[in-house]
Amino acid sequence: MTDALPTVLLVDDEEHSLASMRMALEDDFDCLTASNAAEAEKLMEDNFVQVIFCDQRMPGKTGVEFLVEVRDRWPDTVRIIITGYTETNDMIAAINEAGIYQFLTKPWHPDQLLMSAKNAADLFRLSREHDQMALEMRYLSRSAESKVEEQRKALREGLGFEKVLRAPNSPMNNVVEQARQFASFDVSVMINGEDGTDKATLARAMHYASLRSDKGFFEINCAGADEDLIEAELFGAKPSAAHGRQKRNLGLLRKAEKGTVFLRNVGDLSPRLQRAMARFATEGTFRPIGASELERSDVRLLASSNGDLMAEVSAGRFRADLFFALSQTTLTVPPLRARIVDLPILAQNQLFDAAAKHGKPVHGLSDDAIRFLERYSWPGNLRELENEMVRMLIFSQDSVLGPELISRHILQASPDDTDADDRIDHVLVSDGTLKDRVEQIEMRILRETLTRLKWNKSRAAAELGLSRVGLRAKIDRYGITEPNKANATEHQED
């Protein structure tokens, strides 16, 4: 007999919103629906509900008012509220007072909703198990205490890796699963991946899932800074009248005692600092600037690299002893182009973060905009995606951002591109006749111009120096269709 699905209660006065939430969750949850607080309260009384998703704006009681009552009557039920960015600070304070586990902003993405529901159900289960363990501690031996600590550790682990956003079928799932296993062992981890893949978030999650989670997590970027500054920040410095230091500067290796230090871009350390770090990584000792004696510190080291450090070791540019000391275990974070299934949830999340930061509410990206974003190879990874979301937000006039706001080089990416080598710069040096290569570029310019001008053919023809008849002929020749109107026989011309 299979275990029953966890029960989730969906509360919203809009029928289409309830239907959308049910569609996103019904494969993994037993879904109950209510259109107001009174209906929801009756369902709570008759069912064992683990998680509630409740809209804030409803006739009668608001979402917060209802969830305050739920907190008092059913405190174990995990409460999630759905809000907009237009909510006031007073409402946010009320959310905190109601003991809300999480709040989602509209429009939510189905993958985001499903992940929130799964994490909330896990939290409910672990909390109940923790409470049961706490009761048993009165009668059981000290072994029960270790079980309680295991439950607390599981809670910390889930909250840490929750920040690694991804789709349910993401290539990142395997990476996260490996990271969870490495986190529980006190070993060094080398995290490899291209620049901009957000390796720091994975490192931070591993710390908070480890036995050192109650101590500090510190990170330092080894690239681009002065060698002496990095040395002082890592190892600290003793007071020195000669150098104008009146008091001791505690370095990260001392501040992070019993905690974790994350070395970003470790391959950029100078040979002198590599030698000093190799001693610490292998022996646990270091010498602060101006000190005559070595000091010892218990710190877990995590590191990241954008390049092939093993090749640097072979070339003699990176110390082998430091490399192997930092690489007891390794992780490789895939670039964004290799996890394009995650792009919708990542782009929407970065857009909403930018909207909150800059005080410009939006409702998300259109389906057409997401399709164009998915065609691009993103050489700058998540950092480039974040910059694009900020740029689109700045120029947006509507609450839903369309493809006309996307940067021109992204719009020019071919819908048939399956490899970065098909980008325009590679077309220029690829094989093929001049006619074929010119046509590839011409087709992309046409698509980009039409999309940017919202398919106003008069403006597009004028900008490209074509007649409207000539533009029409080229559109038909290349089979370029307006998004969502592929089956239409004619487009409206302004």
Image (spheres, grey):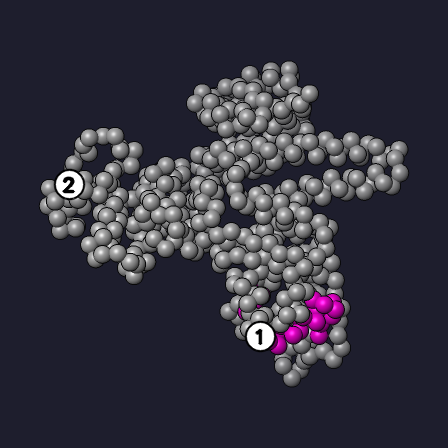
Camera-nearest residue between 79 and 484: 484
Residue at the front extreme of this rendering: 432
Q: Which residue is disc 1 drawn over?
A: 316
Q: Amino acid at mark 2?
A: Arg
- The answer to whether residue 65 of the structure is visible from this angle is no
Name the foreground residue: 450 vs 422.
Answer: 422
Expressed as whole percent of the image width and height from the top left, the position of residue 464 reads 16, 50
Mark before the other along the chain sequence, 2 or 1:
1
Say whether residue 109 is left or right of residue 242.
Answer: left
Measured as percent of width and height from the top left, residue 273 is found at 62, 74
Rendered-image quadrant of the C terminus: top left
Q: Residue at position x 48%, y 52% from top?
A: 335
Q: Please tell me whether mark 1 sits on a helix, a strand or a loop.
A: loop
Mark 2 crowd level (few <14, some 14–19, many ≥20, 10 Å Cα): some
- The answer to whether residue 402 is visible is yes
Q: Which mark is residue 110?
A: none
Q: Residue at x 44, y 34 (%)?
A: 107
Residue 459: quadrant of the picture: top left
* Residue 365 magenta: no
Q: CA distance from mark 2 to mark 1?
A: 60 Å
Judge whether 19 appears above or below 231 on screen: above
Q: Dot 2 lies on which element?
A: helix
Q: Quadrant of the N terminus?
A: top right
Read off the magenta span.
265-287
Give me the disc on residue 472. Answer: 2
Residue 224, placed above or below residue 400: below
How busy is the neighbourhood of tag 1: few (under 14 within 10 Å), some, or many (20 plus)?
few
Q: Nearer the viewer, residue 309 or 285?
A: 309
Query: Residue at (62%, 72%) from the top-left corner?
Result: 319
